[in-house]
Image (tube, rainbow, N blue to C red):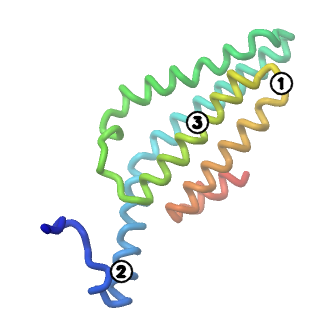
Amino acid sequence: MDQDPDLIDMEALSPRESLNLITDILQEAKERQEQNGIIYIFWGILVAAVSLAQFVLQEMGMYHWIFLAYMIIPLGVVVNYFAFPRYRERGTANFIGQVVGVVWIFAAANMMILGFALYGELTKHLSPFIMILLGLALSASGYLLKVRILFYAGIL
């Protein structure tokens, strides 16, 4: 049976080589995420806009229209898809990069569920739940990528 030339025989590596391999993988994921920082800025601005829109609608007493603020999120997904096409490439991220992507997909899915399905139950208490999910995803990304600013921003 032929082996994939990209696969590494972990048993043949010395402890030092194994540590160097792990360090290289972490560094590659960190560099890739630093290059992709514009996405974090984009989504940060988008979530801030959603939160501001919800606050304004809430203060105006337009509780039945607050769900409209969350319509910005699907628009952001479309913009993200077309504005950042190179980030769609499959197989370009290492395992840590893939885990970070999955964390954000689950966070976004849960935010959508909260915003659309559970809005009637949460009403004006929706923003704190959204912020908690954002903080968890941001902290997890920072921890996995060993980027302190992301980690502490998520805690904040």
Q: Which residue is mark 1?
A: 121
Could you give the CA–CA distance between mark 2 and mark 3, rounded to whole angstroms? 34 Å
Give the amino acid at mark 3. Ala
Query: Relative to residue 75, is residue 20 depicted above or below?
Result: below
The answer to whether mark 3 and mark 1 are in CB contact below 8 A is no
Q: Which residue is mark 2?
A: 20
Are there few (<14), some (14-19), or many (20+) residues within 10 Å of tag 2?
few
Q: Nearer the viewer, mark 2 or mark 3?
A: 3
The answer to whether mark 1 and mark 2 are in CB contact below 8 A is no
Q: Going from the N terminus, do you reach mark 2 or mark 3 first?
A: 2
Q: Which residue is mark 3?
A: 108
- 27 or 113: nearer the eye? 113
Are there few (<14), some (14-19), or many (20+) residues within 10 Å of tag 3?
some
| Residue 68 coordinates in the image, percent (x, y) | 67, 14
| Residue 132 coordinates in the image, percent (x, y) | 73, 44
Could you give the CA–CA distance between mark 3 and mark 1, rounded to whole angstroms? 19 Å
